[in-house]
Image (tube, helix red, strand yellow):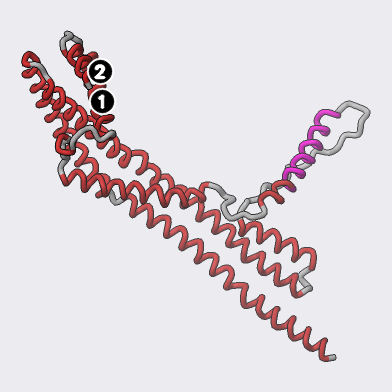
């Protein structure tokens, strides 16, 4: 530390401007943080922050982690395909259809006035929603079309497809509501009020390091520098008190904010409406499908008896 003491003494002896003084304080704080991290500062030489402040820090950390944990999962609602197992296969079929549409329309536009046969422009292929309910609806509809509704399985598939069409519409509505009423405000709370409180805490830490660095400087100050060093400690103490009070106020404001509970209610309500709609749609056709099942089984057994 002898080299550090000499450097500090030489810096202290210079008549520096305000910016140079800030640079010196920043350097002292950095050295203080490093020495604390390396265990070179005794615990009783580190300024103790108020217990109220430390308790609020722990609660804000818990609040932030709760936001991050739920956000990590619910961000799936930003992407329509979160429950879509056949995305690759259907996407490839769509790509092939789109390429064919592109080639046909390119030819229709660019072969006019030539001797080559000009195809008629075609309509673009319809876009498909990439959700599990939509995929179930499409596959059941395809099966019903292939078998025909005179066939019992074909009729059952048609009923099933109709139910999942309603579920699919409810799924899209759920996701849109969650994005607008939950995800956006939930992320806003993280990036504004919680972030402001975190920055206030960073300011407290920086002020505390500056104070403890000033105390270390006072311990080593020459007689000529004692008064100036003592004044710097007093100024640093006042700054820490002020920044701690600001941080406490901001942390209390964040913790008392009712918005996150309101957002969570919107998420729950959207999910409830979706599951209710799904249950109602499936319940409305399950009885009919069961009747078709019983009738088909009866006919099968009757044919086996003969």
30 or 234, which lies in front? 30
Residue 280 is situated, as x and y percent measured from the top left of the image, at: 54, 69
Q: Is residue 95 left or right of residue 227?
A: right
Which residue is located at x 25 percent, y 37 percent?
A: 201
Tag shown at residue 102? none
> What distance separates the C-alpha of mark 1 from that of mark 2?
12 Å
The magenta-colored residue range is: 93-111
Residue sitting at x 62%, y 72%: 285
* SS majority, magenta: helix
Verify whether residue 247 appears in magenta.
no
Horizontal and vertical percent for residue 40?
23, 32
Judge the density around disc 1: few (<14), some (14-19), many (≥20) Cα neighbours within 10 Å: some
Image-based side of 42 in relation to 268, left or right: left
Q: Is residue 105 above or below residue 94?
A: above
Which residue of the protein is positioned furthest toward the right in this rendering?
Answer: 115
The picture places residue 288, in percent across and down from the top left corner, at 65, 77
Tag 1 secondary structure: helix
Q: Residue furthest front?
A: 2
**Which residue position holds label 1?**
31
Q: Nearer the viewer, residue 249 or 98?
A: 249
Say if 29 sits above or below 187 in the image: above
Most extreme residue toward the top is: 15
Residue matched to label 2: 23
Residue at position x 57%, y 73% in the image? 283
Which residue is at a point 66% across and 68% down the rendered structure image? Answer: 160
- Which quadrant is home to the N terminus? top left
Decide which of 268, 6 is in the foreground and name it: 6
Q: Position of residue 55 (x, y in %)?
A: 21, 48
Residue 280, compared with residue 189, is above or below; it is below
Report if the CB atoms under discs 1 and 2 are less than 8 Å apart.
no
Instruction: Judge by depth and name the residue closer to the eye, 264 or 20.
Output: 20
Q: Earlier in the sequence, mark 1 or mark 2?
A: 2
């Amino acid at each position: 530390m002898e080299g550090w003491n000499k450097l500090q003494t030489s810096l202290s002896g210079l008549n520096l401007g305000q910016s140079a003084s800030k640079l010196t304080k920043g350097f002292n704080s950095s050295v203080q943080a490093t020495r604390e991290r390396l265990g070179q500062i005794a615990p009783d030489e580190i300024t103790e922050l108020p217990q109220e402040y430390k308790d609020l820090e722990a609660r804000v950390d818990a609040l932030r982690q709760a936001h991050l944990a739920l956000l990590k999962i619910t961000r799936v609602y930003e992407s329509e395909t979160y429950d879509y197992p056949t995305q690759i296969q259907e996407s490839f079929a769509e790509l092939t259809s789109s390429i064919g549409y592109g080639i046909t329309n390119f030819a229709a536009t660019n072969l006019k006035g030539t001797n080559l046969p000009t195809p008629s422009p075609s309509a673009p292929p319809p876009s498909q929603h990439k959700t599990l309910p939509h995929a179930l609806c499409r596959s059941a509809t395809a099966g019903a079309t292939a078998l025909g509704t005179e066939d019992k399985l074909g009729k059952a598939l048609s009923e099933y497809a109709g139910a999942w069409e309603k579920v699919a519409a409810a799924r899209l509505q759920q996701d849109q509501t969650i994005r607008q009423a939950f995800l956006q405000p939930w992320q806003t709370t993280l990036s504004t009020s919680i972030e402001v409180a975190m920055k206030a805490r960073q300011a407290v830490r920086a002020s505390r390091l500056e104070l403890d660095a000033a105390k270390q400087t006072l311990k080593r100050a020459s007689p000529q520098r004692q008064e100036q060093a003592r004044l710097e400690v007093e100024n640093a103490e006042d700054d820490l008190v002020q920044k701690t009070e600001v941080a406490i106020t901001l942390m209390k404001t964040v913790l008392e904010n009712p918005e996150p509970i309101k957002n969570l209610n919107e998420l729950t309500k959207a999910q409830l409406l979706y599951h209710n709609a799904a249950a109602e749609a499936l319940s409305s056709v399950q009885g009919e499908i069961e009747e078709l099942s019983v009738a088909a089984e009866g006919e099968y057994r009757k044919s086996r008896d003969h």
